[in-house]
């Protein structure tokens, strides 16, 4: 482990030389990045570049084989339990229970988080699922499932958002909902790291982009401020 | 209070698992049907000799429970894996032993119900007379089910990370369950009067010891096996 001397209180997310190996294949080869508090940063890169793996390590779902990472100065390996209480992670898949209703899914989340069940109706209303709260998730469209996953994310009141393709399957209203959630977290001194294929839906909320290629950030120059009207080369 | 929060998590997981099993009826119906089918097949294999059937009845009931129990344990983590729900579950802040405890309670309820069906089917199919000491028999069955469920849930959590979990679980579980199977079968036979060579007492004590040791060990180890 590296020493924590590099830590600054202004950094919400710090990763230094992160390496991850699956079998004999290194998926991450020394990723270093910093997301200060109050910033939303996009992690860009082609399929297989390691974006999801970075998020999963930061979210304590995977242990790195090399390097270190911190969330609000808590090491993601040593202080994993604390990190989990800071982080809101949204994965590719919604991670919902198909045979439970929307409301039951959120009530389960409330139980796991130690929150009052009375908060569930309010959050369902916020994500626009009140009318179908008693419907089993199995019958939901992908977009509705995504909204429910966002509702669960809101319940956690996260200080750091780790979002893996957060806009997938969302309609325009859903995209706005997602962006509102990100804005709220960032403006309250939190931070967000978004793994994206397409930059357009997040254009208005991002501060910077970081590009990941073949498991590493090629050079510090690639970490750049977002232009007013970003033009992206095809991924 | 931390313990109240932990207990709420345990109840939430147990309730969620039982609700999803109840609604996905194919799960329990399939497992219970398999258990009864195994009993019938064993009965057919043993032939029409009534004495031989009665002698083999206890072993047949426990084997049917064991084989169909493996399906139940695999299902308890399959529910989490189907929609990628395991990761959100692991990301909730709080003690992870509560996940194991919740699943243990749900699996105990599930397997107990299955054992009740298998036992009734065994009594009917193998012509067993209900013994006078039936409360002791129920206690032996409960101790056996605890041992089965504790190890089954633990190894299912371990195998859930593997693509070959359906194969891996019985390979890991069956050798470890030999003491439970032996003790439960022998104690049950003694209580039914089918085995005059053995007393139930020492085997019941073995079951209690096994259950206590593995309850403690699995609760300690769960945090590590569920880590990626």
Image (spheres, coloured by chain):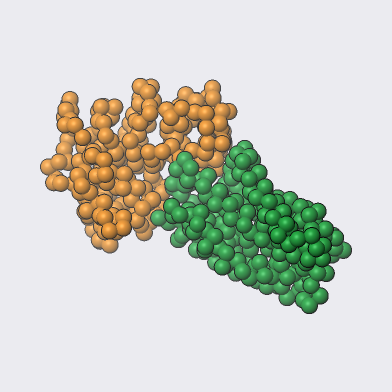
Q: Is residue B51 visible?
A: yes
Residue at the (54%, 52%) spot, across then down: B74
Q: Is residue A81 above or below residue A186?
A: below
Q: Position of residue A104 (x, y in %)?
A: 56, 35
- In this view, the residue in front, B25 or A41, is B25
| Residue nearest the observer in this picture, A68 or A135 | A135
Q: Residue at x 55, y 63 (%)?
A: B173
Q: Is residue A71 at all visible to an observer of this figure? A: no
Tell me if residue B223 comes above or below residue B88 in the rendering: below
Q: Is B203 on the left or on the right of A185, as rendered? A: right
Relative image position of residue B17 (x, y in whole percent): 59, 45
Chain coloured orange here? A
Rendered location of residue B127, percent (x, y) = 82, 58
Quadrant hosting residue A228: top left
- Closer to the camera in the image, A157 or B137: B137
Q: In the rendered view, would you say A103 is above or below B52?
A: above
- In this rendering, would B171 be left or right of A168? right
Residue A26 quadrant = bottom left
Colour given to chain B in the rendered image: green
Report the quarter where the C terminus of chain B lies. Answer: bottom left
- The residue located at (76%, 60%) in the rendering is B47
Q: Which residue: 52% across, 63% down?
A: B172
Locate residue A115, reporting x and y percent: 53, 40
């Amino acid at each position: 482990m590296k020493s924590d001397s590099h830590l600054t209180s202004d950094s919400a997310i710090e990763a230094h030389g992160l390496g991850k190996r699956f079998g004999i294949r290194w998926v991450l080869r020394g990723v270093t990045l910093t997301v200060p508090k109050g910033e939303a940063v996009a992690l860009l890169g082609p399929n297989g570049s390691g974006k999801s793996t970075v998020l999963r390590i930061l979210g304590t779902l995977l242990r790195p084989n090399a390097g270190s990472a911190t969330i609000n100065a808590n090491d993601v390996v040593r202080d994993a339990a604390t990190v989990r209480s800071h982080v809101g992670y949204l994965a590719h898949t919604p991670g919902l229970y198909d045979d439970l209703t929307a409301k039951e899914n959120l009530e389960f989340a409330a139980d796991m988080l130690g929150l009052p069940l009375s908060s569930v109706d309010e959050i369902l209303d916020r994500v626009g699922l009140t009318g179908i709260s008693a419907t089993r998730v199995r019958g939901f469209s992908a977009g509705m499932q995504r909204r429910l996953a966002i509702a669960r994310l809101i319940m956690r009141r996260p200080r750091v958002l780790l979002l893996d393709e957060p806009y997938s399957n969302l309609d325009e209203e859903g995209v706005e909902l997602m962006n509102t959630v990100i804005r709220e977290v960032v403006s309250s001194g939190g931070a967000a790291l978004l793994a994206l294929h397409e930059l357009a839906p997040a254009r208005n909320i991002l501060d910077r982009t970081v590009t990941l290629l073949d498991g590493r950030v090629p050079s510090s120059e690639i970490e750049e401020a977002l232009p007013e009207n970003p033009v992206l080369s095809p991924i | 209070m931390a313990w109240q929060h932990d207990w709420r998590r345990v109840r939430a997981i147990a309730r969620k698992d039982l609700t999803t099993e109840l609604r996905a009826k194919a799960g329990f119906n399939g497992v219970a049907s398999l258990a009864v089918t195994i009993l019938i097949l064993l009965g057919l294999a043993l032939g029409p000799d009534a004495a031989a059937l009665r002698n083999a009845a206890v072993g047949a009931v426990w084997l049917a429970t064991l084989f169909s129990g493996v399906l139940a344990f695999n299902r308890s983590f399959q529910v989490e894996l189907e929609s990628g729900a395991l990761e959100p579950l692991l990301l909730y802040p709080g003690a992870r032993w509560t996940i194991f405890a919740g699943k243990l309670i749900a699996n105990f309820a599930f397997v107990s119900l299955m054992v009740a069906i298998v036992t009734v089917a065994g009594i009917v199919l193998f012509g067993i007379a209900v013994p006078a000491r039936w409360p002791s028999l129920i206690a032996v069955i409960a101790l056996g089910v605890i041992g089965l469920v504790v190890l089954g849930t633990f190894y299912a959590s371990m195998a859930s990370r593997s693509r070959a979990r359906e194969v891996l679980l019985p390979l890991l579980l069956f050798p470890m369950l030999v003491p439970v199977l032996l003790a439960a079968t022998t104690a049950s036979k003694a209580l039914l009067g089918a085995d005059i060579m053995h007393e139930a007492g020492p085997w019941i004590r073995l079951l209690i010891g096994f259950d206590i040791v593995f309850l403690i060990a699995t609760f300690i180890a769960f945090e590590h096996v569920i880590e990626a």
